Image: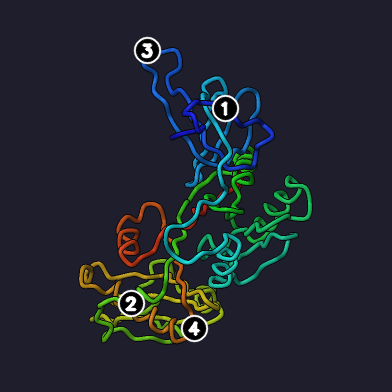
Amino acid sequence: MEFTAGGRLEVRITPADVGKRISVRRLSEPGSAGGRFTDTVGVLTSWNDGVVHITRRDGESVRIPEHTLVAGKVVPSAPARRRGPAASYEELARVCARAWRPVESERLGDWELRAAAGFTRRANSVLPLGDPGRPLDEALTHVRQWYAARELPAYIQTATGAEGTQELLCAELAARGWEREVSAALHVGALAPVADLDADVSRVELSRSCDEAWLRRYGRAGDLAPHVSKVLASGPSVWFASVPGSGDTAAAIGRCVVDGRWAGFMAVEVDPGHRRQGLATAVMTALARQALLDGASAAWLQVEDDNDGARALYGRMGFAAHHAYHHYRHGGA
């Protein structure tokens, strides 16, 4: 990593750069013979009492003693994407929110408090796009009370790793005892390559609603309470894909929500006994072809960090990570 044109190492950041994306180099083993350098890139979230905190793209916070820094500089807040459709974090956050609507919601300034009887964190968490309209501690108190009144844990959904994401809010939440429980990545890609995949879609059935066979395959449906179907049916233009199984449960399923130029894919699941038969690819392809007919041109989906198989599959389809998102839970909830 080169920090100056002449190759000299300089620390060119100060506490005034909090909130900016920076790149630093530090001596990881100061005072030892042959000490090694470690590079860190992320958003500078605090610089107090001789300690620098940087939040990386994946949401991890790195603590660096100031005296170990040997170089540092401010870098562009959003590096140019190498592939896939260009989009801002806020655009994608709003599109994703419209594709998975809660049963009830309330505005708190620019924040949206969402609840759906506990069905998925996405539908039961705060989406903080902007200013809550009051001091942060007061806003967080209101959030905790709002969810407590519904007998739900208080979650706040944040994002890191793109221009306009919420590294500073993540740091503020962590400092107040909120714990990051789940992290995932939002991936984007062009829609046409997915629709052009060589997949056997002859068994895939598309519908505007999900039947009981679809719901039985869906791993998060639980007791199939009415709020589950209500959340699944929400969105501007919703399509369900299903591959019939041998019994009363679908062999494979998927859901797609078309919203302007965007097609969002979710709930792609395959019966373990039918895996490695190309069913997930067939479901994605069938939904993508329908989304193209509905006028979409770009695609998005969300993948949890520990789902290596899904990341590999979607990578082969041309998807790439745009940003990471996280759910913070209040420690006292």
Mark 4 is surrounded, within 10 Å at the Cα level, by few (under 14), some (14 to 19) or many (20 or more) other residues, namely some
Mark closer to the chain start, 1 or 2: 1
What amino acid is found at the position of numbered circle 1 in the picture?
Val
Separation of disc 4 and disc 2 at Cα?
19 Å
Residue wearing tag 1: 11
What amino acid is found at the position of numbered circle 4 in the picture?
Gly
Mark closer to the chain start, 1 or 4: 1
Residue wearing tag 4: 295
Give the residue displayed 66% in from the left and 61% down from the top. Answer: 113
Residue wearing tag 3: 33
Position of 45 relative to 308 (above/below)? above
What amino acid is found at the position of numbered circle 2 in the picture?
Val
- Callout 2: SS: helix
Mark closer to the chain start, 4 or 2: 2
Q: Is residue 155 visible?
A: no
On the image, the x and y values in percent for residue 103 come to 61, 72
Residue 283 marker: 2
What amino acid is found at the position of numbered circle 3 in the picture?
Ala
The label nearer to you, 1 versus 2, is: 1
